[in-house]
Amino acid sequence: MTATSWPESKPTACLVLADGTVIEGEGLGATGKSSGEVCFNTAMTGYQEILTDPSYAGQIITFTFPHIGNVGTNDEDVETVNMARNSGVAGCVLRAPITAPSNWRAAKNLDAWLKARGIPGIADVDTRALTNRIREHGMANAVIVHDPAGNFDYEALKAEAAAMPAMDGQDLVPGVTSAQRYDWHETSWKPSQGYGHREDGECHVVVVDYGIKRNILRLLTEEGCKVTVLPATATAEDILSLNPDGVFLSNGPGDPAATGSYAVPAIRSVIDSGTPTFGICLGHQMMGLALGGKTAKMHQGHHGANHPVKDKTTGKVEIVSMNHGFAIDRDSLPPEVEETHVSLFDGSNAGLRLKDKPVFSVQYHPEASPGPQDSHYLFQRFMNLIRENLKARTDKTPA
Ligand SMILES: NC(=O)CC[C@H](N)C(=O)O
């Protein structure tokens, strides 16, 4: 796609915020209208993985990094399990128009890729000003329209944006979870080999899919787990009847408290069963709810690949990938829960564990994709819990 010389030309896209702010720019990706909560992501790499992360369902992503599209897209850096399915991302906002890709892995221009997945976008936006606005006033609901003819009814769009429901209270998991149970066999990507494959494992882990990313499944398999994935509506009985050695609770979109009506009772019973359990992001938040804690909407949220987090159990600082708009209120957690990780940006809770059970979770994304790999150790921590638990079970079995 060649860049048009906006602002001399007529705008072909607009972003209309709930407070009536109108931002005009150059349309890209799919044509048409979409709506969502506008957040900003500060990652400098990995836009394709971000745009395919189902945790972003119902959100319009503003990229603060200006060079989006420069390495094109490919068929490998997709995080949705169903590769062809849009993750639910409602749109994207870019500083600069998309230029021709320059990368040996590029298979398709980002503009064409967005079009094929039905995601509209807008470029030539002052993303720094928009980010400052979100930092001051919080994440706003907005309508995004891409119309090559540039016909926008701003009054109608303002009314539509103002009438949108808030992200609080929305259960968006049904739109992204898998419809049925499946097994997972893909392992991590290695240079000149691509993704690997594993048939069997040292232990069996049941994953509950609230909108899982492929790289979580790959890292579990890579560590030696045989992985079975269940839909989000799986009951504790569905999960425990598979006799898992470990249970994993995935990331996902929307408000954890709204999703909690069906997921939290299941998680509570899994915890009570004593099965080693690990949760990430939405899984972490719902783990907190199952343990009696509370979650709350954040002002601007955390979305990026450069967030410092401290592991309080080791004193080490890791640089992590983050993507959340809700957080656990640490003061609401009961005494049997220990806070294990904390965000060094704003001091919010970033991890927990149960003192008397093999159960832990983190608010961030240790699988990265995109982002630094500092936190991969958490997958080994999970494996160690599983191994210790299996050993304790064998030791107790009479000879
Ligand atoms: N990445 C996630 O799992 C996000 C969790 C939740 N939807 C939030 O925004 O806080």
Image: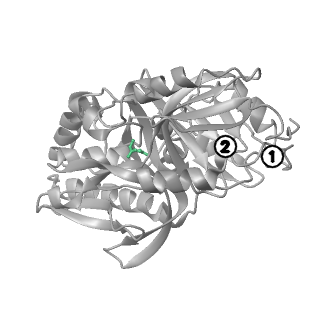
* Above-or-below relation of 280 to 90: below
Q: Is residue 158 left or right of residue 334?
A: right
Q: How far across and down, in percent of the image, does residue 269 sit?
A: 17, 39
Q: How far across and down, in percent of the image, does residue 101 sit?
A: 84, 45
**Residue 214 placement: quadrant:** top right
Q: Residue at x 82, y 37 (%)?
A: 107
* Above-or-below relation of 1 to 330: above
Query: Which part of the image, by quadrant, shows the N terminus?
Result: top right
| Residue 105 badge | 1
Q: Is residue 294 left or right of residue 82?
A: left
Q: Amino acid at mark 2?
A: Asp
* Above-or-below relation of 7 to 277: above
Q: Is residue 108 left or right of residue 269?
A: right
Query: Mark 2 and mark 1: span between their CA atoms?
Result: 10 Å
Q: Residue furthest bottom?
A: 315
Q: What crowding class fits label 2: few (fewer than 14 Cα within 10 Å), some (14-19), or many (20 or more)?
A: some
* Above-or-below relation of 134 to 181: below
By what rule are the colours in the image chosen?
A: one colour
Mark 2, secondary structure of its residue: loop
In the rendered image, which residue does mark 2 sit on? 77
Q: How far across and down, in percent of the image, does residue 313 sit?
A: 31, 74
Q: Residue furthest front?
A: 155
| Residue 269 in sight here | yes
Mark 1, secondary structure of its residue: loop
**Residue 357 placement: quadrant:** bottom left
Q: Are marks 2 and 1 in contact (CB under 8 Å)?
A: yes
On whether ligand 1 comes within 8 Å of the CB at mark 2, the answer is no
Q: Amino acid at mark 1?
A: Arg
| Residue 95 badge | none
Q: Residue furthest left?
A: 335
Q: Is residue 157 left or right of residue 250?
A: right
